[in-house]
């Protein structure tokens, strides 16, 4: 118990220093939100709220959103906004990595930049815009969703593999019990 207390105080000090280093006032709520984002890649605001509540007790949805906004604004974390799904947050901000996003289940993973250091941040012609952000997202279907589609197709066409038959007979046996 004592050890846990000491450890958590170390984390608090480290994060508070980190926040101050970025010019952010270190409040308990901001620290809890930052630690939640660091705990899981591409986390949603709802999941951040859940983790932060475990750590500091009650925290309103608005307070979570406010803290996330400040941390994004100051460059401590990055927000990804996949079209048609909830925004995700990550603490991997110091590189120019991109994302692979599944159209079916929304699974999102990191992929390194294909060309190197931040090439896409420099537009061929900025047309007078002051550009501060560029996003590359590859959309498609993840391996799990492709596999599900393959199994569904096989059942549909009546061609069953041994695995499918085993799975079906297991289900039938369970139903009989
Ligand atoms: Zn998927
Ligand atoms: Zn990422």
Image (tube, rainbow, N blue to C red):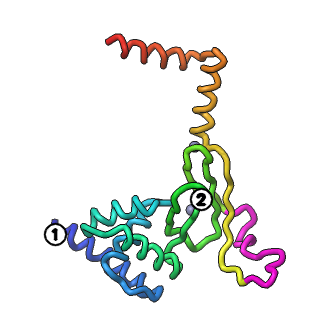
Q: Quarter of the image for the C terminus: give it.
A: top left
Is 131 positioned to the left or the right of 161 in the image? Answer: right
Of residues 96 and 42, the one nearer the viewer is 42
Q: Earlier in the sequence, mark 2 or mark 1?
A: 1
Is 49 positioned to the left or the right of 153 in the image? Answer: left
Is 130 positioned to the left or the right of 62 in the image? Answer: right
Write the start and end of the magenta stretch as one range.
113-129
Spatial separation of the CA atoms under disc 2 and disc 1? 43 Å
Image coordinates for residue 168, horizontal then vertical, percent: 48, 16
Dominant SS of magenta comes to loop
Query: Does the magenta portion include 114?
Result: yes
- Residue at the (64%, 25%) spot, across then down: 153
- Residue at the (78%, 75%) spot, across then down: 123
Which residue is most to the top?
176
**Mark 2 residue element:** loop
Quarter of the image where one finds residue 146: top right
Is 41 situated above or below 118? above
Q: Quarter of the image for the N terminus: give it.
A: bottom left
- Residue at the (81%, 81%) spot, across then down: 127
Quarter of the image where one finds residue 120: bottom right
Question: Which quadrant of the frame does ligand 1 lie within?
Answer: top right
Query: Does the magenta portion include 93?
Result: no
Image coordinates for residue 101, horizontal then vertical, percent: 61, 52
What residue is shown with label 1?
A: 2
What residue is shown with label 2?
A: 82
Is 146 positioned to the left or the right of 88 in the image? Answer: right
Image coordinates for residue 71, horizontal then vertical, percent: 47, 77
């Amino acid at each position: 118990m004592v050890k846990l207390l000491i450890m958590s105080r170390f984390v608090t000090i480290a994060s508070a220093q980190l926040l101050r280093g970025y010019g952010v006032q270190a409040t308990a709520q901001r620290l809890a939100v930052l630690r939640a984002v660091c705990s899981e890649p591409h986390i949603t605001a709802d999941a951040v709220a859940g983790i932060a509540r475990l750590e500091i007790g009650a925290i309103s949805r608005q307070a979570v959103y406010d803290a996330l906004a400040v941390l994004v604004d100051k460059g401590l974390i990055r927000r990804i906004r996949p079209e048609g799904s909830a925004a995700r947050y990550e603490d991997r901000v110091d590189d120019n990595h991109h994302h692979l996003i599944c159209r079916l289940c929304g699974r999102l993973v990191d992929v390194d930049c294909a060309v190197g250091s931040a090439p896409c941040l420099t537009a061929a012609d900025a047309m007078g815009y002051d550009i501060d952000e560029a996003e590359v997202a590859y959309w498609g279907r993840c391996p799990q969703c492709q596999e599900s589609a393959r199994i569904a197709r096989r059942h549909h066409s009546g061609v069953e593999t041994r695995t499918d038959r085993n799975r079906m007979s297991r289900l039938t046996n369970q139903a009989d019990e």
